[in-house]
Image (spheres, helix red, strand yellow):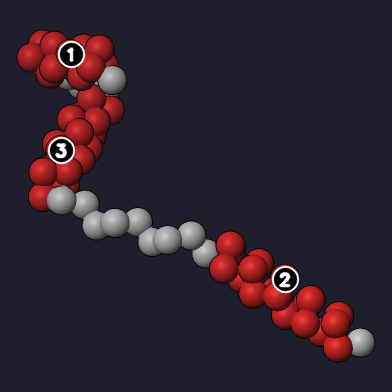
Amino acid sequence: MIDRLILSAVLGAVGWNGLYPEPPKPLTAEQLIKKGREQSISNVCAKKKKTPKVRELCAKWEKHQ
């Protein structure tokens, strides 16, 4: 009986530790700037009305990805 209790406690502890992964590391300033720039370009390219300059920008952006 006591061996089952110990076994269940060990397995529970191992399972509990595996449930929650490490939290992601905070982004650096350069990564935040890059992410914001990409999001901005994505928002502009998602609009229906586009000027010729915006079309060129979106074409370059799509090739880049």
In the rendered image, which residue does mark 1 sit on? 60
Q: CA distance from mark 2 to mark 3?
A: 43 Å
In the rendered image, which residue does mark 2 sit on? 11
Q: Residue 59 location in percent, x, y?
A: 21, 12
In the rendered image, which residue does mark 3 sit on? 34
Mark 3: secondary structure: helix
Q: CA distance from mark 2 to mark 1?
A: 53 Å
Of 1 and 30, nearer the camera is 1
Marks 2 and 3, the one that precedes in the sequence: 2
Q: Residues within 10 Å of mark 1 (few under 14, many from 20)?
A: few
Given this view, does label 2 or label 3 mark the residue nearer the observer? 2
Q: Residue 44 location in percent, x, y?
A: 19, 30
Task: State how many labels appear.
Answer: 3
Q: Residue at x 25, y 12 (%)?
A: 63
Q: Residue 48 location in percent, x, y?
A: 26, 23
Task: Name the amino acid type tagged 1.
Answer: Lys
Q: Is residue 19 above or below residue 54?
A: below
